[in-house]
Amino acid sequence: MSETYPAAAEPAAPHRYTAAMAADIEARWQDFWAAEGTYEAPNPSGDLADDSGLTARPKKYVMDMFPYPSGAGLHVGHPLGYIATDVFARYQRMSGYNVLHTLGFDAFGLPAEQYAVQTGTHPRVSTEANMVTMTAQLRRLGLGHDKRRSVATMDPDFYKWTQWIFVQIFNSWYDKDADRARPISELVAEFESGGRPTPDGRPWDALSARERADILGEYRLAYASDAPVNWAPGLGTVLANEEVTADGRSERGNFPVFKAKLRQWNMRITAYADRLLNDLDELDWPEAIKQQQRNWIGRSEGARVDFAVGEAGAITVFTTRQDTLFGATYMVLAPEHELIEKIVPAAWPEGTHQVWTGGHATPADAVTAYRKQASSKSDVERQAEAKDKTGVFTGAYATNPVSGEQVPVFIADYVLMGYGTGAIMAVPAHDSRDFAFARAFELPVRCVVEPTDGRSTDTSEWDDAFASYDATIVNSTGTDITLDGLGVVDAKARITAWLSERGIGEGTVNFRLRDWLFSRQRYWGEPFPVVYDEDGIAHTLPESMLPLELPEVDDYSPRTFDPDDADSRPETPLSRNESWVDVELDLGEGEGVKRYRRETNTMPNWAGSCWYELRYLDPHNSERPVDPDIEQYWMGPREGQPHGGVDLYVGGAEHAVLHLLYARFWSKMLFDLGYTSSGEPFHKLYNQGMIQAFVYRDARGIAVPAAEVEERDGAYWYEGAKVSRILGKMGKSLKNAVTPDEIFAEYGADTLRLYEMAMGPLDVSRPWDTRAVVGQYRLLQRLWRNVVDEATGEVTVVEGEADEVTLRALHKAIDGVGQDMAGLRFNTAIAKITELNNHLTKAGGPLTRSVAERLVLLVAPLAPHISEELWRKLGHTDSVVHQDFPVADPAYTVDEAVTCVVQIKGKVKARLEVSPSITDEELEALALGDAAVVAALDGAGIRKVIVRAPKLVNIVPA
Ligand code: ANZ
């Protein structure tokens, strides 16, 4: 790849389209568009309203997942999605829509902070510098963004509203009956009036401030709680479940993650589990992403069942297989379960099996030792299927409610505290984990679901559980109930009813989704708008005190620890700033000036992206996050979009359960609280593929600079040595990054745009090949040559109408390209444009003006600069950007007809000239209505019609 690109050859003619000319054209029009505000989309009201009349048009809101302003700059893989949305937005603008398209920056985050720690540069300074560089690179691509609407999440004018939204969330609760969030003041009113009793029945005004705060904390949608959280000592911060990988490490940095009990802020996303699940059905999203969200939310229908245990009352289990209750031969509590202390007897019961005790003298010793061992493992390690099952007997027995049998209660780490009730009934015959445990601890295995795979109900010979929903219940008869002979579904229903009648169980739905851990021990994030009074009660800041800006500090580094030090505890950088933390304020709550301590955690870097789609709409509003009328215009529900939302959102698939779930959650809260009309942020989601690149490695496996590798005799060589080649990611670390700047210099932005769109279907990953870029450059050169004389620079078009063949080629292209653009099939759109352009080149002679103009309009969304230049050269004084996309004349798009033979009983009775794309139904109707066919049938009824569109219809009379 070290040879000179063909494009660099000297122009043979003075007015040929070359890289130099492209550079000139592109810079000129970019300046012009910026000066004219060509891409500004007006709002129906407010400071971005105008009198252009565009808001009378239907709207299209097109959005990209905004970038993190990284210091590495862009490579050609980054803008794939941005170019695609730009082409789409331009096409929609030309199709009569008021199109909003802009791009901001997701500016808070770890890398800036790490860079700051390394270099001593303030994260804001480095982030701002990166934003300037990236903005210039993106501008060079000719993206048609409304610059006035760009936002950065680190901007106090932006995060003022992130904080404000936090306050609204804090001040609301989820009313399960109304199935929506409501202001917390309405809950307080219910407590005050006695309409809702307090937990211990005392009147509300008899409670202390602390007690009230604690009660409300159980309801608030943002709440602080002491709970086991994911603590990554190596990162120095706690993390949300969504940020922990399947093998229990931090997604960022790949550090071990431990459970630590810490007081942290949470968002009650679980209140929205059902709506987050159900509303997916109405979104136009890739099925794979919807499925990932469904799995993450993890809805399970089952039952809670109480097993009586000694004085302690009952152990409540969650099971999805209550139909197997007769097969529950032991129970397991998670090692952290709080009932354990209450049920553990002083000594082992008479005759306790040696393997159950783990060799400990007392149950208390056994439990203590086992708990210690379990606490050092991650949930994933604990759940690993292959692993030997460990556990220990608690010394206690519980009563199986349906059989009356006494079953031993164990603790074992395969049961997790954070799921269901943290306790299970173990049915070893029908659950593999229970089976393995029962074999290890010599516990009875009782078959209660008749195997359908040939084995008998004698479990002594089984080597695994029989787990099936499609089978019949056996061995399940008690004194007043039998499930025998029922299928699983019916048995579940019957036993659930039996349990509820007795008040010892009920049908229930359990979710895998946990509340969202919302605190981070970081500097570079939004400060919480929260202060604590002397009693440690949290108060939110009044709107007049927002934004609460990040203090200037000398030391913004996180305190990190030995990655394996599970006992370490986080320290927040903001806590090092005593004069910021310790404040005297009048919160306007009628208490006057009081001393408070500020919350020193910051919000996770997902906070800003939870609502940025709203701020683009009304970026300068100083009264509220977004004006309701403006939100309604751009985001409101409409036909086919019952929850409203952005019309097209393009980005990578990696955000399936992070950003995309969090943003949906915030959108629903803001909707419930009446701030927005849309209950979903993104109606249509599209995941673009990745641009990959070849990675070349030497014998040691180290990546070598891809640009210096030579290809000889089917092998690859670097500095005289053979290197291997695989397809991988593009990036600096793999030494295979190609920058857009290189391609701009060699060919120009229009060529880069075309190449990226032509590489393949947008959602498929594809390898970058610099040598192939020239193909799109040649297309633009031919396009230019079809309109402009390369010797004189004058347009060559003539007046008059084109010939029939050309008109057919033109209108077919218009028809196909329009549909492809609307469907994001830019690669096939380019293929059609290429075909048309080749046809025009081959036809020779000057184009008619009308053909040339429509050709230019077709290309405009893809290659806006050359199109604008040609459009002006064709004599127009207004921008190509706001022209109407050409409309195909159906007279020229229908293909030549084909002949269809109509037979009756195998004999040809008629021939019809039909369109090759006719459907079976249309063809049948046409054939049966044909005069010759009607005559031949002579009133006979029809038994059968066999249609093979477009060529054959065979009629069998009755
Ligand atoms: C008895 C039983 C019998 C179960 C059987 C399964 C099969 P999903 O579908 O993922 O919701 N379980 C419940 N809580 C648990 C916890 N905290 N840690 C580990 N396992 C737990 O899984 C629900 C099933 O997982 C429950 O149904 C329970 O085992 C187990 F033939 O109860 B089952």
Image (cartoon, rainbow, N blue to C red):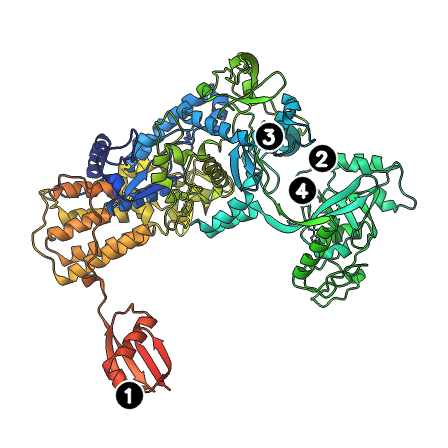
Decide: few, some or many residues near mark 1? Use Cα within 10 Å; few <14, some 14-19, many ≥20.
few
Residue 517, image x and y in percent?
A: 57, 33
Look at the numbered disc 4 and say if its residue's Cβ is closer than 8 Å to ligand 1: no
Tag 3–tag 2 contact (CB < 8 Å): no
Q: Secondary structure at mark 1?
A: loop
Residue 620, image x and y in percent?
A: 34, 27
Compare marks 1 and 4 and give the one earlier in the sequence: 4
With respect to residue 716, does 127 lie above or below? above
The residue wearing badge 2 is 375
Tag 1–tag 3 contact (CB < 8 Å): no
User: From where the camera sits, is residue 232 visible?
Assistant: no
Q: Which numbered disc, 3 or 2, marks the residue closer to the eye?
A: 3
The residue wearing badge 1 is 938
Q: Amino acid at mark 3?
A: Ser
Q: What is the spatial separation of the Cα atoms under label 1 and label 3, in whole angstroms?
A: 85 Å
Q: Quadrant of residue 802?
A: bottom left
Is 759 left, or right, of 652 in this rendering?
left
Q: Which numbered disc, 1 or 2, marks the residue closer to the eye?
A: 1
The residue wearing badge 4 is 381
